[in-house]
Image (spheres, helix red, strand yellow):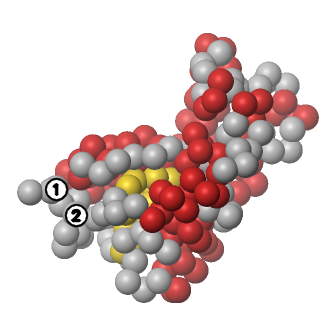
Amino acid sequence: MLGFDERLAHPPRRVLVAGVSGCGKSTLARRISAAIDRPYVELDALFHGPRWTPRAQFLDDVRALAATDSWVTEWLYPAARPLLAARADLLVWLDPPFLPVTLPRLVRRTLRRRLRRETLWNGNVEPPLRTVVTDPEHILRWSIATRNAYRGWVPALASTRPELTVVRLRSTRQVEHWLDTALPRLP
């Protein structure tokens, strides 16, 4: 695993961004995509169909994405993780502190999306706030329940794919430093 201040030898072609819900994966993936001029594909947009139903073609879409020469996406969904990890050459693990950073960020995002009725993937909107207590898979509950999962998943992947470059970023300062200095740009 590389430290956040170690420069990559070459621009990556296929990048995964890992981390618990609300840590900033999609935002960072977009920024990496722009910095290295690789296409960004939002995995949530491939997964969620209308009325929050999983799209039947999700895994076919993930296989097609993984087979392409270059991409940046999030490392999400148990069935998709191995397909993407097998082809990635860089995994960026966002691991900020959960309580002072990630959970408040996720609460603000969830409230903003719900109150503004922001349209998400395939016409979906955040469910009513009461679903935090009624839906065991509500994004806030999911984030709390899985907050430590990446501490097992990322090292396990790194041990099975020693050639995969893994960078762990634990703060906004580290993210900014890494984007500014460690991520090589295309010529």
Is residue 177 visible in the rendered image? The answer is no
Q: Which residue is mark 1?
A: 185
What residue is rendered at 84% in x and 30% in y?
Answer: 131
Residue positioned most to the top: 116
Q: Does residue 179 sit above or below 163 in this rendering? A: above
Give the secondary structure at mark 1: loop
- Which quarter of the rendered picture does the C terminus lie within? bottom left
Q: Does residue 15 sit above or below 36 in this rendering? A: below
Residue 175 lies left or right of residue 82; in this view the side is left
Between the C-alphas of marks 1 and 2, the distance is 6 Å
Residue positioned most to the right: 134
The label on residue 11 is 2
What residue is rendered at 59% in x and 65% in y?
Answer: 81
Which x, y percent locates residue 136? Answer: 86, 44
What residue is rendered at 37% in x and 68% in y?
Answer: 90
Lower position in the chain sequence, tag 1 or tag 2: 2
- Which quarter of the rendered picture does the N terminus lie within? bottom left
Answer with the quarter of the image where residue 147 lies. Answer: bottom right
- The foreground one among 102 and 21 is 21
Give the secondary structure at mark 2: loop
Is residue 37 visible in the rendered image? The answer is yes
* Amino acid bearing label 1: Arg
Which x, y percent locates residue 153? Answer: 61, 72
Which x, y percent locates residue 68? Answer: 40, 61
For the residue carrying disc 2, how many other residues have a C-alpha within 10 Å: few (<14), some (14-19), or many (20+)?
A: some
Which x, y percent locates residue 75? Answer: 54, 59
- The foreground one among 162 and 62 is 62
* Amino acid bearing label 2: Pro
Answer with the quarter of the image where residue 50 lies. Answer: top right
